[in-house]
Image: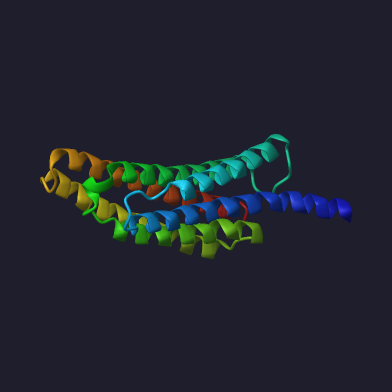
Amino acid sequence: MRLVKKLLARENRFSTLLKASAEEVQANVKALDQLLNSASPAVSLKAFLQSRAKEQEIKAEIDSLLCQGHRTPLEHADVEALARLLNRTVKGLRKFAERYLICGPHIRDVSFGKEIQLLVAASAVLHQMVASLGAGPRVATAKTHNDELQKIEADADSLIVEHVVAIYQGRYEPMKSIMVKDLYEQLDRVFARCRSAGDLVLQIVLKNS
């Protein structure tokens, strides 16, 4: 019985780590929201750096467990791919925060509020999908959540395209246009990674149903 419990604990460890990684995505989105709403341009990146360090630890433990051949009900390749996507999403959010602070006063009049609201929604849905892997997710629920993510990503894409069109139409002076376009492209990559992670979770659920 002890051996069985030990094996089950090892199997659940992967689910716990993946869930923790999805929580770091949410934490970074929250930190980004706070940064964008801060009255001070000199907001520290401390929260992002701490979260990034924690995410790196999570990813390292997952890699270590996989290399040691620990058992998991999920395919090792799927665990590795999902961990990598979540890690890259956290990295993308940190990059956006860094570039936003670098641009500083030049873009204070540019609002990213709608995009951040969509990111909050996307990270919440993604967290639900990843957390469900440890409890035997249902195909119907996974499909519903993935459809939500797809819609959020499509809405974000439409918003970003509108902003890029405005840039090309000369809304901002040249240097500011470069800054704003770079930031929107970075956000676009974050949304794409959330969508890809959702697609992968659905594939995992279908494969193991």
Q: Residue furthest top?
A: 67
The C terminus: image quadrant: bottom right
Q: Is residue 7 left or right of residue 147?
A: right
Residue at x-position 64% and y-position 42%: 62
How many circles with numbers are drawn on the protein?
0
Q: Who is closer to the viewer here, 97 or 127?
A: 97
Q: Could you say where residue 18 lies in the image, as x and y percent from the top left?
A: 60, 50
Question: Residue 147 placed where, x, y %?
Answer: 42, 60
Residue with the most extreme left position: 170
Residue 206 visible? The answer is: yes
Q: Residue at x 56, y 56 (%)?
A: 130
Q: Is residue 109 above or below residue 185?
A: below
78 up-or-down from 157: above or below: above
Q: Quadrant of residue 68?
A: top right
Relative depth, front residue between 29 and 106:
106
The residue positioned 29% from the left and 55% from the top of the image is: 112
Q: Nearer the viewer, residue 16 or 116?
A: 116
The colour scheme used to paint the residues is rainbow
Query: In this orientation, does residue 150 appear?
Result: no
| Residue 182 higher or lower than 111, as above or below | above
> In the picture, which quadrant includes the N terminus?
bottom right
Q: Quadrant of residue 60?
A: top right
- Residue at the spot 66% in from the left edge and 49% down from the top edge: 14
